[in-house]
Image (cartoon, helix red, strand yellow):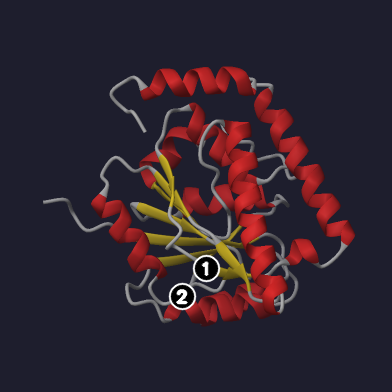
Amino acid sequence: MTPEPTVSVVIPVLDDAAHLRVCLAHLARQTRPADEVVVVDNGSVDGSADVAREFGARVVTEPERGIPAASAAGFDAAVGTLLLRCDADTRAPEDWIERITARFAADPRLDALTGPGEFYDQPGLLGVLRSRLYTNAYRWAAGAALAGTPLWGSNLALRAEAWQAVRGSVHRHRADLHDDLDLSFHLALAGHIVRFDPHVRVGAAGRIFHSLGARARQGRMAGATLRANWAILPPGQRWVRRVQQARGPRAD
């Protein structure tokens, strides 16, 4: 029998104590509790680390600023066989971990998993439309760019072995990159199997819609992430490589 996985939830945080408190409260109500919650304090001065300890989370300090460095430090420190990642503003439904572990148990070849989010701070029909538009636009545009399935940092999971395989190649020291998209590039390049599950959903803050500046910053980071990874292997060659991998024993 396959042993029961152990689950580590990794949350990078920088001065987001109020959101983190709500996030950890949601994780405390999971039908399948995490075996550990690792909060990576990226230099907070607002008491985020104290909030984490109040909820029994393990606090890891990462002095190098930037989500790529913080997320990588959390994955490195985690001891679970399944590594889940969310943001401080994520609100996970009670069955989030249960759904993820069931999906990995049902597919031993699965290396990483992601799902959609709903922006809880965007009102009414506009919020629904923005949530669906963002999910679909990111999934298909980023998927075409990397020749694979893109992970979303507010809602992702991967096997510890998959992280170990790419931890030395991700751009952890590039604070100007999207860590989730960068990780997706490296997993795809290594031939890991990544799936999107529409039923593995979370709530998230729609911060990208809060200001034009936020959207511009996200766009600049996306461009930098594409350039950094296309310099390793251009998109056309990535698609050729994916087709070749699909013909092999690890067909997706």
- Find numbered disc 1 in the image and state the secondary structure of the residue it sits on: strand
Name the one closer to the observer, 208 or 140.
140
The residue positioned farthest toward the left in the image shown? 1
The residue carrying mark 1 is: 202
- The image shows a total of numbered marks equal to 2
Amino acid type assigned to the residue bearing label 1 in the image? Val
Please tell me which residue is depicted at 77% across the width and 37% down the height of the picture.
223
Q: Position of residue 204 (x, y in %)?
A: 62, 69
Q: Amino acid at mark 2?
A: Pro
Q: Is residue 188 above or below residue 91?
A: above
In the image, which disc is placed on residue 93? Answer: 2
Left or right for 174, reference 8? right
Q: Are marks 1 and 2 in contact (CB under 8 Å)?
A: yes
Sort mark 1 into few (<14), some (14-19) or many (20+) by Cα contacts within 10 Å: many
Quadrant (top left/top right/bottom left/bottom right) for the C terminus: top left
Residue for point 42% across, 63% down: 199
The numbered mark, 1 or 2, whose residue comes first in the sequence reads: 2
The image quarter in which residue 44 lies? bottom right
Residue at screen point 38% across, 73% down? 95
Disc assigned to residue 132: none
Q: Looking at the image, is 25 positioned above or below residue 67?
A: below
